[in-house]
Image: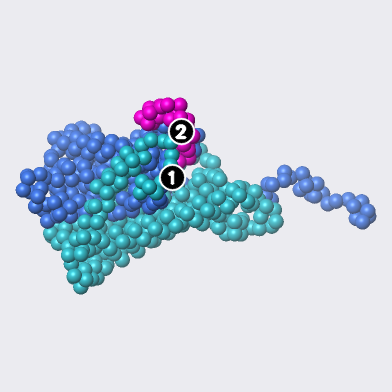
Chain colours: A blue, B cyan
Amino acid sequence: MAAVLDKPLPEAAPRRVARPIGRPPSRSRWMPIALTTVALAYVTIALFVPLAAVFVEAFRKGIAHYFASISEPDALSAIRLTFTAAAIAVPANLVFGVSAAWAIAKFDFKGKAILITLIDLPFSVSPVVSGLVYVLMFGLQGWFGPWLQAHDIKIIFAVPGIVLATIFVTFPFVARELIPLMQAQGRDEEEAAVALGASGWQTFWRVTLPNVKWGILYGVILCNARAMGEFGAVSVVSGHIRGTTNTLPLHVEILYNEYNFAAAFACASLLAFLALVTLVIKTVVERRFLKAAR
Amino acid sequence: MLTLRRPSVLPGFRLTLGTTLFYLALIVLIPLSAAFAKTLSMTWEQFWMTVTAPRVLASLRLSFGAAFIAALVNAVFGLLVAWVLVRNPFPGRRIVDALVDLPFALPTAVAGIALTAVYAPNGWLGAPLAALGIKVAFTPLGVLVALIFIGLPFVVRTVQPVLEDMEKELEEAARLLGARPFQVFMRIVLPTLMPALLTGFTLAFARAVGEYGSVVFIAGNMPMVSEIAPLVIISKLEQYDYPGATALAVVMLLASFVMLLAINLLQGWMRRRNAQERNV
């Protein structure tokens, strides 16, 4: 045994022993580089190229044509309707999201899992089907169609239908952001506040809201992006009446189908810009606040 | 329901749960049940004839088939992108990380016309592909391209957090014991990521099956060839064929329910798996 140990070790052996423990042997250099290259090529082709195409096509006929396209009356009325729909849908879903998160995160009751699943339901329904169900409710042949016609109320092919369809497709955004966040934060702080004599509203405004405000902002941003950009559901209920029931995405479609490509892409670039702003705010909120909170 | 809850000192249960249930019923449940109620006015034969008409079947086959292939492509490349974002730091990583969410933020109609411009026979990528004899825009391949675009973030975003939490020790131990990188990937990395990967795949698939906005521009919409199921619903509506549109909508709704159930089961599996790992 001693003889074996006395034998001088081969040259390379001491270096191998000195290698830090836990580092795998002979990690190849080219593998990470190859993987990164393929991943970046994929992201470039799938994401960067289409995004760049929107802006290049928008300015194809020059800056003057660009600004003319986004400031003509039909475009302006489409922008206005898009903002109107979002201005109703987002606050409605915000109030719903907060109250759903309060009920689900702060109380234990039977059927909670089913409730959470039902809240997520609109995400897995096709946008076209989302629009269709409102036509079946409020359209001329729908459940309430005859009654609405008798009272001269228009919902389908009018602004209320657009708002309803927008609310449907953006329904889960705020709730699904807030529910896990408020569940993770628990109930201790609220219970302490109530025990010290705070009313329900005081507890909510002074204790809960400061804790979840970034989560709310996050949900609202995503909700707003989808509300302003929704196409399929709104397309079914809108009737495509220019200057009246056209949202910006529908206006883009009409211009495109008229082969007015530069104008279509000019209006599309506004929506793409909105998407980029959304991503920037989302990234900042995520980095600064949500990761720390979770 | 009120009697079924555990007592709590916090106020607002009736108010918040009441608001939630009322709003949920008004916006989601009653409208969705309208679709099922409408199909009840059809006889079973009428329903069956509608949903098995050749044009409808072809559109369903395209919607589900293309969504499946797109989700598969995104599972492979989404895993790769997530891996690179977590494990291989490179300059500009944060920008790429933020940009992965672009398909969530970009309106589908904008994505649709942008992809059409890029893949049209005279487009940036369409022209070189056309030179190779591959036609993308206005063919079923165009449908696939659009569905890959909108499904891209799902797998990345479900796999990424699991990968960030994953202990490197296991992989390193395997390597020290002589496993090749490919073996480490197949035996250690992939099994750990499997629940997340499947969840992301199912989410991407569910989204792609019902997708409309990004597809209609690039698909060309030829009946029997490149017409997706949501578009058939729209064209039936435009012909005032409400029962026909609703029948197809119910088929798609049932498919969404099944996928929602699958997603829930997968997420439960994921949570249990993560909890197990933390306990070990």
- Which label belongs to residue A191? 2
Instruction: State the residue at coordinates (29%, 51%).
Output: B214
Instruction: Locate residue A13, reporting x and y percent.
Output: 80, 50
Q: Nearer the viewer, residue A32 or A273?
A: A273
Which quadrant would residue A220 be assigned to in this image?
top left
A240 horizontally vs B96: left or right = left
Query: Does residue B171 sit above or below B59 in this rendering?
Result: above
Q: Which mark is residue B6?
A: 1
Q: Nearer the viewer, mark 2 or mark 1?
A: 1
Queried whether the magenta region covers residue A193, the answer comes back as: yes
Labels 2 and 1 within one chain: no
Q: Residue farthest to the right?
A: A3
The answer to whether residue A112 is left or right of residue B51 is right
Mark drawn on residue B168: none
Question: What amino acid type should be assigned to the residue bearing mark 1?
Answer: Arg
Chain containing mark 1: B
Q: What's the residue at 27%, 67% (across, down)?
A: B58
Per the image, label 2 sits on a secondary structure element best described as: helix
Crowd around label 1: few <14 · some 14–19 · many ≥20 (10 Å): few
Q: Which residues are magenta?
A: A180-206
Give the answer, above or below, for where A294 lies relative to B3: above
Residue at 23% x, 49% y is A233
Residue A36, position as x, y percentages in the image: 51, 47
Which residue is more in the foreground, A203 or B81? A203
- For the point 29% across and 60% down, the residue is B252
Badge 1 element: loop
